[in-house]
Image (cartoon, rainbow, N blue to C red):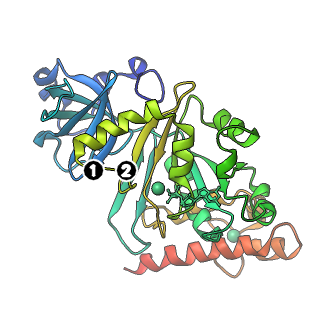
Amino acid sequence: MRRYGKNPDEDDIRTRPNPKGNRPRTNIRPKHEDASQGMVLTVDRGRITCLVEDRPVLAMKARELGRKAAVVGDEVDLVGDLSGRKDTLARIVRIGKRRSVLRRTADDDDPYERVVVANADQLAVVTALADPEPRPRLIDRCLVAAYDGGLEPLLVLTKSDLAPPDALLETYRPLGIRYVVTQRDELEDGDAADRMREYLDGRATAFVGHSGVGKTTLVNALVPEDRRRVTGHVNAVTGRGRHTTTSALALPLAKGDGWVIDTPGIRSFGLHHVDPSRVILAFPDLVPGTEGCPRACGHDEPDCALDDWVAEGHADPARLYSLRRLLATRERREGD
Ligand SMILES: Nc1nc2c(ncn2[C@@H]2O[C@H](COP(=O)(O)OP(=O)(O)O)[C@@H](O)[C@H]2O)c(=O)[nH]1
Ligand SMILES: [Mg+2]
Ligand SMILES: [Zn+2]
């Protein structure tokens, strides 16, 4: 089993320049020449479980790393006891450059941004068709975070046994986003499961969504039990009996070399860190309507061309409303 994403040998973190440009890497390099590579599977109160070769290894951050946090999906270098045996603790001495970052803030006014998952290729935005009711504006926020962080979105509509997907699909189909409609009883076999695997194989996918939408149910169905034993081990190590999704957790997929990352339920998805001009990226269905906009239009002003374009019937007014809501909450922070 290897770390996810591209072949790590092609772009070894040891040969990368220091991204910050100050303190040259050569200062610390000779110290840890013998370090092993690993990938962060989960983080629990400073205890970081990494996959090293085939085994989970409990580690903590070396002091020299400063305040930079290791998050699920991070490619790290470790030293110390890498046996993975009980009561051992390795040290993470390097965190590799991230290819993508899923970030969120608690709310739009909160300047404290948190990286939820590193190096994921794809963001599965999980929404139940009922129980809990779909929240399109939360979907839109997740899409903004996906485009901003370099993750390709996949819309996963669960609990189709409770309600039909038609209304939501009508809203999201024009965006050209790939989607899967699933229900628990069809996850083992059936078209939805096959399509789902097609999208997931060979890539790292982070699953996000409101609590109760069925993320853990999906992840458990996709990852066979013997592979989930890695988690069993993790839980034994961290002393938690059952995985209750209090922190993100990466699990290897059965086929291909993909990864799925379960994350805790979210009630909101703060986007303080996103530049307002990038919010429109999550509204590809509205982008053609911005052609007639004045230069550097914020799409929230009186001469924005989107009003007329939507009034002409090119898009659902609810989409423009959602965009403006997002922009309005983003703007509130400009004054602080
Ligand atoms: N009716 C129905 N219930 C489901 C489905 N998928 C999951 N559930 C139930 O929804 C609840 C929440 O599921 P869970 O996977 O824990 O959601 P999470 O909080 O997103 O991880 C559980 O009681 C599941 O059994 C589904 O397709 N249909
Ligand atoms: Mg869960
Ligand atoms: Zn505009």
- For ligand 3, give the image quadrant: bottom right
10 Å neighbourhood of mark 2: few (<14), some, or many (≥20)?
A: few
Give the residue type that dot 2 points to.
His
Confirm whether residue 263 shows in the render. yes
Confirm whether residue 298 shows in the render. no
Q: Residue furthest right?
A: 312
Give the residue type that dot 1 points to.
Arg
Q: Name the residue under label 2.
A: 243
Whether 59 is drawn above or below 155: the answer is above
Depth order, front residue of 17/30: 30
Quadrant where the N terminus sits is top left
- Asked if the beta carbon under badge 2 is closer than 8 A to the nearest atom of ligand 2, the reply is no
Please give left or right for residue 244 compared with residue 161 in the image: left
Whether 154 is drawn above or below 251: the answer is below
Please give left or right for residue 61 compared with residue 277 in the image: left
Helix, strand or loop status at disc 2: loop
Helix, strand or loop status at disc 1: loop
Residue 284 image offset from top left, x and y in percent:
71, 56
Find the distance from the CA under tag 2 to the CA under tag 1. 7 Å
Quadrant where the C terminus sits is bottom left
Q: Which residue is drawn at 78% across and 75% down?
A: 317
Please give left or right for residue 122 compared with residue 309 in the image: left
Q: Mark 1 points at which residue?
A: 240
- Asked if the beta carbon under badge 1 is closer than 8 A to the nearest atom of ligand 2, the reply is no
Residue 69 image offset from top left, x and y in percent:
26, 48
**Quadrant in which residue 279 is drawn:** bottom right
Q: Does the CB distance between marks 2 and 1 fall below 8 Å?
A: yes
Residue 334 image offset from top left, x and y in percent:
43, 76
